Image: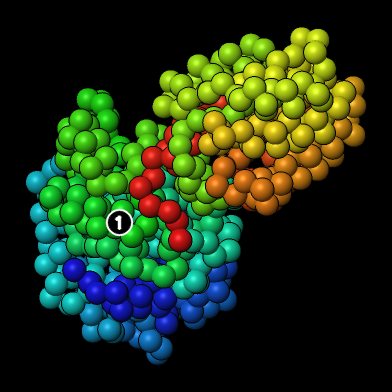
Amino acid sequence: MANISEFNRIFHPRGVAVVGVSSNPAKFGNIFFSGLIEAGSNVYPINLKEKEILGREAYPSVKEIPDDVDYAVISIPTSGIPKVIEDCGEKGVKAVSIYTAEYSESGTKEGIKREKELVDAAKKANVRIIGPNCIGIYCPGGRLSFFPGVSMERGDIGFISQSGGHAEEFAYEAESWGIRFSKIISYGNACDVNCEELLAYLAEDPETRIIGIYVEGVKDGRRFFDTLKDAARQKPVVIWKGGATEGGTRAVASHTGSLAGSPAIWSTAIKQSGAIEVSGRDEFADTLSAIRYLSRPSGKAAGIVGAGGGAGVTSTDICEMNGLSVPQLEVKTMEELSKIVPPMGTSVKNPVDLSYFLIQNFSLLGECTELVAGDPNVDMLIVHVSHFDMMVKSRPSELETIFKTLVGTKKMMADKFPKKPLVIILHPTGSIDVEIEKVKLRKRLVKEGMCVYPSISRAARALSNLASLEIEIE
């Protein structure tokens, strides 16, 4: 297992070599190289034939680079990789990530043999391998990126992913959830550097406050869960386990060559470790966002404010199905609500239903939320906004009122009820034009540090996960 200083050098390299770069922009070597140039890395292309690529001098071998190199990205056929690793060892390269596949994940004797030869070559050269069958490392602080166009804004969430596709998607899409990453590691087949090492590193990493993991299987279950338990004592850890069904287990074997294991055993062990298990991409992102921006509530009692009696009933059902409760408000709270909520077709019970009066006076939402938040029976607030089509088409200027009201409500909650998390639901619309306006609104709210979800079910699941955290984020 590498120590902290060794991994720090890998994530913050003095130089990066990309082996397999060509002038063809469709080739992955070129894509990796372009991304690293854009990220500001000291990056060197390796190509046996070409002298210059994208304005950078090309070298026939890693050994020919005149400067220090700590990390290399390899995207060439399997037959040439052992020699590249040998050259990297002679150059003093600390680690390589290997994009090339056709190793143990193929399930063939030849692939398994190739992977063993890879490990033997790396040990002999004293070089660590990330992969194969992966896209490697993203680290804004170390000027490392997978591909062009990925934000290099530094964050505090570390993401370990056995899937290169999930790693890439989150690198590009995290902005829509308002989250940023300290590091993302796609580790593929884990023939050398494994999930346990990376988890132990992120648990100690001062740049990382929250840890997310997508894992399909591990080789040493006891070691993994011991490491997970230790990490979860220090920082919030969210786990998305791939291969939770019979078909998914088969897909795992062909994807990364891992043994998926029993879903029931995984779930029990994750729960015992103190980590949070999620069941898919949306819940993973929603939960990370909630942990990043919201305080951990003292309980699971939700206060719900919005418009629509049916929506209130459905919201209550969904909350309780996800482990939350929707308690009765105190008489005093309902009396105060009755003073400002018109009596026709509304309700001052929990959920609070403002009906169509919300369209006429959206600021009413903020006033009611403050009263509900002050109720001692309530631990968290869910504010849902509906009737977008009607509001936008009849009163387009109302969007700015909605934005200001919701931002003002967030500030009020932070000042008066800092331990009661607030989430916003922007319900689906029926018009593409209105949906576009809603997306713009959501983007603005996310920039204000708000957790905005497209449905009650996603919000309820994220809040339930947040409430189950055993430690506070520091």
Report the residue at 11% width, 67% height from top.
120
Q: Position of residue 135 (x, y in %)?
A: 38, 56
Label 1: element kind:
helix
Q: Residue furthest front?
A: 332
How are the colours assigned in the image? Answer: rainbow
Question: Is 439 displayed left or right of 364 in the figure?
Answer: left
| Badge 1 density bin: few <14, some 14–19, many ≥20, Cα 10 Å | some
Can residue 125 be seen here? The reply is yes
Quarter of image, res 400? top right
Question: Is 302 displayed left or right of 245 in the figure?
Answer: right
In this orientation, which residue lies closer to the viewer: 42 or 243? 243
In the image, residue 184 sits, relative to residue 271, either above or below, namely: below
Check disc 1 and give the amino acid type: Arg
In this orientation, which residue lies closer to the viewer: 210 or 375? 375
Q: Position of residue 151 (x, y in %)?
A: 58, 59
Task: State which quarter of the image contains the N terminus.
Answer: bottom left
Q: Position of residue 29 (x, y in %)?
A: 43, 62
Report the residue at 87% width, 23% height from top.
360
Q: Position of residue 119 (x, y in %)?
A: 15, 64
Residue that badge 1 annotates: 233
In the image, residue 233 sits, relative to residue 401, either above or below, namely: below
Q: Residue furthest bottom?
A: 66
In this orientation, which residue lies closer to the viewer: 174 or 382? 382
Task: State which quarter of the image contains the C terminus.
Answer: bottom left
